[in-house]
Image (spheres, rainbow, N blue to C red):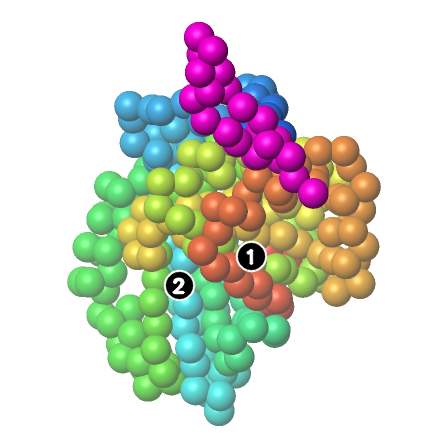
Amino acid sequence: MATNSSVWLKGKMLFKYPVNLHRASRRFSESSDKGWFRSLFVHKVDARKDAHSNLLSKRETSNLYKIQFHNVKPECLEAYNSLEAEVQNRLHQDQDYPCEVVGSWNTWYGEQDQAVHLWRYRGGYPALTECLQKLNTNKEYLEFRKERAKMLISRRNQLLLEFSFWNEPLPRPGPNIYEMRTYNLKPGTMIEWGNHWARAIKYRQENNEAVGGFFSQIGDLYAVHHLWAYESLQSREETRNSAWMKQGWDANVYYTVPLIRSMESRIMIPTKSSPLQ
């Protein structure tokens, strides 16, 4: 049963209040003090006065990436892969075109009958512009685009920069399966994401699974793509589980999950002509 307590001033009672209210007030004050104390140690990102791309990307390389997602008619996928490989090899080996294919895949688990291509433009936007201008006057390439269009249901692309703390994607032997994990972040959280992953990437290097990390500049904004390579689905599971055994990985997950609006995982098989096998 609650009891009352009183406040007196100069022999006069000003008011009464229940003792349990007083105790509750103390608990609130103590919890507020503890919350303030804990806040001193919570990771905070300083405000910046520069573009995210300048703070997060590899300035020394000036590489620009383009990722393409092509949804192919199911009956045309084999013919599409053959046609795409022929054109990619020509562009990849032609020194007049400042672009190179990093990797090409077909989605195994995720959106079906989909082809994914990753291109690198060494020299940034000027290299991209030069390449597009040359392709628009290349009669063979224009014919290829017409033929390819007959095989497609839809297509989309994004222009990307690579995170400064990730590996640059380089050709590797196979056989491997690849996972592309795509994170759509809340606007304004890219710097915080980069700060956490700059520390966390060290937990995912032991098995050479980290291929590349990118963030969008044109297309769907605040999109992040992490590309991983594994020997098999079983190897993927074991590698991901082992990360949880390392002190610090759980903190990265704890702080980055609230930054995400949505996420997607694709398991992909490299095409025969892909430099990433």
Considering the image in quadrants, where does the C terminus appear?
A: bottom right
The outermost residue toward the front is 11
Q: Amino acid at mark 1?
A: Arg
The outermost residue toward the bottom is 75
Compared with 259, 147 (above or below) is below
Q: Which one is nearer the viewer's eye here, 157 or 169?
A: 157
Do we see residue 161 in this rendering? yes
Q: What percent of the width, then of the height, locates residue 267?
A: 61, 66
Please tell me which residue is depicted at 23% across the width and 48% down the height of the picture.
Answer: 130
Q: What percent of the width, then of the height, locates residue 271?
A: 57, 68
Please tell me which residue is depicted at 45% across the width and 41% down the height of the picture.
Answer: 162
Left or right, residue 138 beside residue 46? left
Compared with 180, 253 (above or below) is above
Q: Which one is nearer the viewer's eye here, 55 or 6?
A: 6
The secondary structure type at the circle numbered 1 is strand
Q: Which one is nearer the viewer's eye here, 133 or 108?
A: 108
Q: Amino acid at mark 2?
A: Gln
Q: Which one is nearer the viewer's eye here, 127 or 237?
A: 237
The magenta region covers 1-22
Q: Residues within 10 Å of mark 1 (few under 14, many from 20)?
A: some
Q: What percent of the width, then of the height, locates residue 32?
A: 54, 27
Residue bearing mark 1: 181
